[in-house]
């Protein structure tokens, strides 16, 4: 999965009329993958005495220019495979094409491509702030989004919307998997696999395929973690809540003709819930524990 650089050159004429050395783009070393983290350094000859510039003129989500200094251009891969065209100046400039290929790496074979993970602390912080804030903001909203009609829908909506904007690595729907964010089949990730991810996943699938168990002790969870329950006496036994520190927020789901509602109890209220099956306690077999989204999981 090497990055192929298609080279170009242009002769610039100085103000005195003499020809100046042509800008020439040389192939940089290394490998680029559409993983959002791979980097490539491209050397430009003929740049001495000129203020070199570089910008992506096509395929901005496939590669970005991180820095231009000392006759070198530092490129960073995006998460979308394909071609990107970079223009080097000063005007009239010269262009080169970078080809990047899809990254199918899944180091820990947990079913999620590494390219989908948010490695940077800043990106993780943004996601957690937005995810928990969006879920919390729906409590007391005058009108819920039509799709938010149970606990699983709340999680899907807040997860997807949290990936819009601000996050540096990628933004929904321009993700390594497009709009199909949720793992729905077991097994390690395979780039050629079809149907392993979808836009819909119920609460059980979100828990089993898209999160991992962090702890059974609710006091050790962090804002943005998920509380999962299994109530076997219900037609849809799996239920989820979003942890907000001293509170949790969730959608009850429909009961009969009642469409359900958003609720925001304190953790203390849950621990003293009149029905013991809803208490987030280690000794409660209905409480499955505190889970975290796999896109926040380290691979090492």
Image (cartoon, helix red, strand yellow):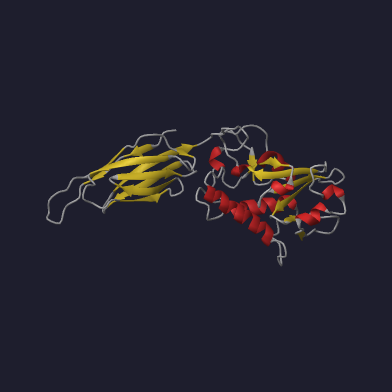
Picture layout, residue 180 above or below residue 253 = above
Residue at (37%, 46%) from the top-left corner? Answer: 85
Q: Taking the image as drawn, is residue 278 in sight?
A: yes
- Where does residue 87 sit, x and y in percent of width and height? 33, 49
Residue lying at the far bottom of the rendered structure: 142
- Where does residue 254 sit, x and y in percent of width and height? 81, 55
Position of 34 with respect to 259 (left or right) is left
Quadrant, the C terminus: top right
Classify residue 256 by image quadrant. bottom right
Residue at (49%, 40%) from the top-left corner? Answer: 35
Q: Nearest the camera: 113 or 80?
A: 113
Residue at (42%, 42%) from the top-left corner? Answer: 83
- Where does residue 206 sit, x and y in percent of width and height? 70, 44
Q: Nearest the camera: 293 or 35?
A: 293
Residue at (70%, 52%) from the top-left corner? Answer: 243
Picture layout, residue 282 above or below residue 16 = above
Q: Taking the image as drawn, is residue 163 in sight?
A: no
Classify residue 263 by image quadrant. bottom right
- Where does residue 288 sit, x and y in percent of width and height? 77, 42
Total marks shown come to: 0
Quadrant, the N terminus: top left
Q: Nearest the camera: 9 or 188?
A: 188
């Amino acid at each position: 999965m090497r990055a192929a650089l298609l080279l170009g050159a242009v002769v610039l004429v100085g103000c005195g009329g003499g020809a100046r050395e042509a800008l020439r783009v040389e192939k940089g070393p290394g490998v680029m993958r559409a993983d959002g983290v791979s980097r490539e350094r491209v050397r430009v000859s003929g740049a001495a005495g000129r203020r070199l510039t570089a910008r992506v003129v096509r395929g901005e989500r496939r590669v970005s220019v991180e820095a231009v200094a000392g006759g070198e251009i530092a490129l960073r891969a995006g998460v979308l495979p394909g071609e990107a065209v970079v223009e080097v100046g000063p005007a009239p400039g010269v262009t080169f094409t970078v080809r990047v290929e899809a990254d199918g790496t899944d180091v820990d074979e947990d079913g999620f491509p590494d390219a989908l993970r948010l490695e940077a602390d800043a990106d993780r912080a943004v996601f957690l702030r937005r995810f928990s804030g969006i879920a919390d903001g729906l409590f007391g909203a005058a009108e819920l989004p039509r799709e938010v009609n149970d606990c699983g829908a709340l999680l899907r909506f807040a997860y997807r919307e949290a990936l819009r904007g601000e996050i540096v690595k990628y933004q929904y729907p321009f993700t390594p998997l497009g709009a199909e964010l949720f793992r729905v089949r077991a097994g390690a990730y395979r780039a050629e696999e079809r149907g392993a991810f979808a836009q819909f996943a119920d609460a059980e699938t979100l828990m089993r395929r898209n999160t991992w168990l962090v702890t059974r002790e609710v006091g050790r969870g962090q804002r943005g973690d998920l509380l999962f329950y299994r109530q076997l006496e219900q037609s849809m036994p799996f239920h989820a809540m979003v942890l907000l520190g001293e509170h949790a927020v969730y959608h009850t789901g429909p009961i009969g003709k009642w469409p359900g509602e958003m609720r925001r109890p304190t953790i203390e209220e849950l621990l003293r819930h009149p029905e013991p099956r809803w208490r987030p306690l280690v000794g409660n077999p209905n409480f499955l524990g505190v889970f975290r989204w796999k896109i926040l999981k380290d691979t090492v």
